[in-house]
Amino acid sequence: MLNYVHDIPTKIYFGKNQISQLESILKPLGKKVLLAYGGGSIKKTGLYDTVKKILDAGGFEVVELSGIAPNPRIESVVEGVALCKHHQIDVILAVGGGSVIDCSKAIAAGVYYPGEDLWEMVKTSDHLQKALPLVDILTLSATGSEFDGGGVISNLKTKEKLGGLFTYPTASICDPTYTFSVSSYQSASGAADIMSHIMEGYFSKTKDSDLSDELAQGVLKTVIKNLPIVLREPDNYSARANLMACASVACSGIPEYGKASTGWPCHAMEHELSAYYDITHGVGLAILTPSWMRYILQKDPSVTWRFVRFAKEVWNLEGQDETKFAYAGIDALEHFFKDAGIPMRLSELGIDDTHFEEMAKHANRNGRLSNAFVALNEQDIVEIFKNCL
């Protein structure tokens, strides 16, 4: 078990009606609020009106930034930073899912960025030191952005989607009832994202970090149990609450404590798919993950033990032949995604192999996946993409 550091400064307000805490959360942070949100779903559900009523009653000065897209664009970051500087904003309030929160994190850091090129800021974000305070109200269980410091921003002009460390939210309001209106497709995609966050760290060569493995397996089993319930009963509070709690923990780093770094290869590859084709992040991860698993298991059979544990502890499978047992766990994962209604081939999304070579090169820039759970080179990545067609 390796050394680790625990440092998560975000305060989570979890459960029904926690929005009643919003005024008291914001008041110590300032009076001028940038209200950031996406395509308008919060207006359809009434959440926007609730938030505005609280802000108006509290005497806050509100400036709005709307239209933040899934796979948030650098253009929204630029617009948000300009609004914050012009109106001397004190605090950002992000209302939405991971895309809105990610974008708001970049805006919060961008206000203090000394340069003019905010895309350059995104590319070097791990060195940022200061940001505006950020509060969020979560509406989608998926990315875990409500409980971590990272964010992912897209530049469609350069066909790049990059993640980095911007800032942790000061506080996150996580009310599962705000996810009742999320579609089956987005709920399933979000669950795939949650599971991917866990699996990216779970498939590590560290064998003795028992607590981390048990936590990871517990999150995976919780998602496996509750996603089908959500798909049948969208307003089932217990199932929605369990998925929301899993989302926060899955990307917090906690299930990776004491484990060797894995490089998060599926995320590296999926960011290329999103950058080139603007697809739903969780869908891309669901398509890539079983293909990556089969590829690395064939490339390096010495990791079979980890897949055996995955099959046994997550899927409750049994078998004598370790190789067949390992592949059975991968098959179970793929069937789970398929049963949830997620497309499982890139060709279903209209994607062909046109850009695979350049995508692979960028995914493995500076040889970053040479230190993955099983090392990958550019040709390996191309083959994994092709296996997903």
Image: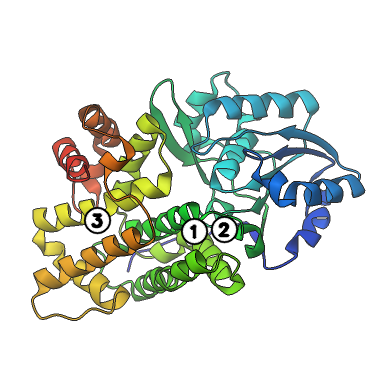
Q: Which residue is mark 3?
A: 290
- The amino acid type, in three-letter code, at marker 1 is Ser
Point out the residue furthest to the front here. Answer: 232
What residue is disc 2 on? 8
Front-lying residue, 70 or 160:
70
For the point 10% across and 56% down, which residue is it? 298
**Residue visible at 42% across and 65% down in the picture:** 255
Q: In whole angstroms, how far apart are the C-alphas of marks 3 and 2?
A: 31 Å
CA neighbours of label 1 inside 10 A, class few (<14), some (14 to 19), many (20+) = many
Image quarter of the N terminus: bottom left
Closer to the camera: disc 2 or disc 1?
A: 1
Task: Look at label 2 and name its amino acid.
Answer: Ile
Q: Nearer the viewer, residue 104 or 366?
A: 104
- Residue 152 left/right relative to 241: left
C-alpha span from label 1 to label 3:
23 Å
Residue contact between numbered discs 2 and 1, judged by CB atoms under 8 Å: yes
First in sequence: mark 1 vs mark 3: 1
Numbered-mark total? 3
x and y, in percent, of residue 348 in the image? 30, 42
For residue 252, which numbered disc appears in the image? 1
- Residue 349 on image: x %, y %: 33, 39
